[in-house]
């Protein structure tokens, strides 16, 4: 997900040179009914449905830990197993991790709509491209729109009711032609989409560039009846360790008021992990921090409020 913001800024910074957000403006937490100064967090798990290890970690993070949300990769092989558990636990906050790339060795997937329907989204083998650059170079906005709609349609056919949408590897943020399809789908279906519209404390620390055009898109999302977040913490994946207590508590202690989504990639690494990814340590670290009782005590001591995309949508429906 970190690439999500790289592409937002890389695409939009050339369009404007002004920063239009003021610290005097109410945060989206305030706009959605929380008290001024509230720090509201979504602990969000990406890549559900990728493999059994990701699913098992997510189950435990929901039932025994502090995780509040997740999103599913519909083209992947373990979606059905997750869905069976979700149907038993309909209160879980689960959305779609709209997937347009297949980036790992020895474990690849193709588009839900079929490779013949979206030829610009696949490589010579019929799998999705391994990186965002090739998607941008080859896939039309119409093909992207067809595929993300197919992923949503498949989820609905399987009985899922996604609470939100976001983008695997940030591909849908790789330019205005894709992002428009993403936002339009969310507004049309009235499904919240992950999009920042507030102070972006940590985002501008990573890339201190102009945000005016981002706010233009954010206004469209808000006026379309959907909620927004103030900031997103994307860099937990870069902590290549199983012990994430210190960096995570530091980031949250310094976090500004507002709604912040913390992106995680929880997994219990199984024996096949080394054959397709080198991310075992960081994924296990995300899993462990969600179950750490000391971390739960830290959240309570810092008076951090946990929320879900379902709650954000409910609160947004009450705001005129």
Image (tube, rainbow, N blue to C red):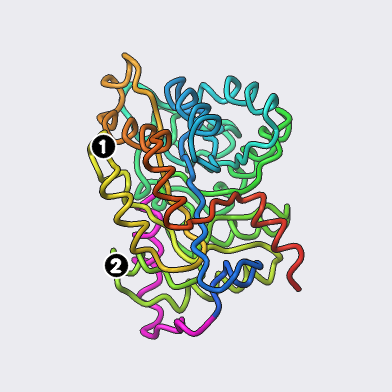
Q: Position of residue 231 (x, y in %)?
A: 45, 63
Quadrant location of the C terminus in the rendered image: bottom right
Q: Nearer the viewer, residue 43 or 293?
A: 293
**CA–CA distance between discs 2 and 1?**
23 Å
Q: Residues within 10 Å of mark 2 (few under 14, many from 20)?
A: few
Q: Is residue 252 above or below residue 199?
A: above
The residue identified by callout 2 is 205
Sequence order check, earlier mark of 2 and 1: 2
Q: How many marks?
A: 2
The residue identified by callout 1 is 243
Q: Residue at x 71, y 65 (%)?
A: 225
**Quarter location, residue 89:** top right
Q: Position of residue 122 (x, y in %)?
A: 45, 36
**Quarter location, residue 289:** top left
- Element carrying mark 2: helix
Q: Residues within 10 Å of mark 1 (few under 14, many from 20)?
A: some
Tell me, for residue 163, which label it has, or none: none
Q: Magenta segment, which residues?
A: 1-25
- Asked whether the residues under the numbered discs 2 and 1 touch, taking CB atoms below 8 Å apart as contact, a structural biologist would say no
Q: Residue at x 55, y 78 (%)?
A: 26
Q: Position of residue 191 (x, y in %)?
A: 68, 52
- Element carrying mark 1: loop
Q: Residue at x 68, y 37 (%)?
A: 91
Q: Nearer the viewer, residue 52 or 285?
A: 285
- Does residue 203 appear left or right of residue 196 in this picture? left
Q: Position of residue 177 (x, y in %)?
A: 52, 62
């Amino acid at each position: 997900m970190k690439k999500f913001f790289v592409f937002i800024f890389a695409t939009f910074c050339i369009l404007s040179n002004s920063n239009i957000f003021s610290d005097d403006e109410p945060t989206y937490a305030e706009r959605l009914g929380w008290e001024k100064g509230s720090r509201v967090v979504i602990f969000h798990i990406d890549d559900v449905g990728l493999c059994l290890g990701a699913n098992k970690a997510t189950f435990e993070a929901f039932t025994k830990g502090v995780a509040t949300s997740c999103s599913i990769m519909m083209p992947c092989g373990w979606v059905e197993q997750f869905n069976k558990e979700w149907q038993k636990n309909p209160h879980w906050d689960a959305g779609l991790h709209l997937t347009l790339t297949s980036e790992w060795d020895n474990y690849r997937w193709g588009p839900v709509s079929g490779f013949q329907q979206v030829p610009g989204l696949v490589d010579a083998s019929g799998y999705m491209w391994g990186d965002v650059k090739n998607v941008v170079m080859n896939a039309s906005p119409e093909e992207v729109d067809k595929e993300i709609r197919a992923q949503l349609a498949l989820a609905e056919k399987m009985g899922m009711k996604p609470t939100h949408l976001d983008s695997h590897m940030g591909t849908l943020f790789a330019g205005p032609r894709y992002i428009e399809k993403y936002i339009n789908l969310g507004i049309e279906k009235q499904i919240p989409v992950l999009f920042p519209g507030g102070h972006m404390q940590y985002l501008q620390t990573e890339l201190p560039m102009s945000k005016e055009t981002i706010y233009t898109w954010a206004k469209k999302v808000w006026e379309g009846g959907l909620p927004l977040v103030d900031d997103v913490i994307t860099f937990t994946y870069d902590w290549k360790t199983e012990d994430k207590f210190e960096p995570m508590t530091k980031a949250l202690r310094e976090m500004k008021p507002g709604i912040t989504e913390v992106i995680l990639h929880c997994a219990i690494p199984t024996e096949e992990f080394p054959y397709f990814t080198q991310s075992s340590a960081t994924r296990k670290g995300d899993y462990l921090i969600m179950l750490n009782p000391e971390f739960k005590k830290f959240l309570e001591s810092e008076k951090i409020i946990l929320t879900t995309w379902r709650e954000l949508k409910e609160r947004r429906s009450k705001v005129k």
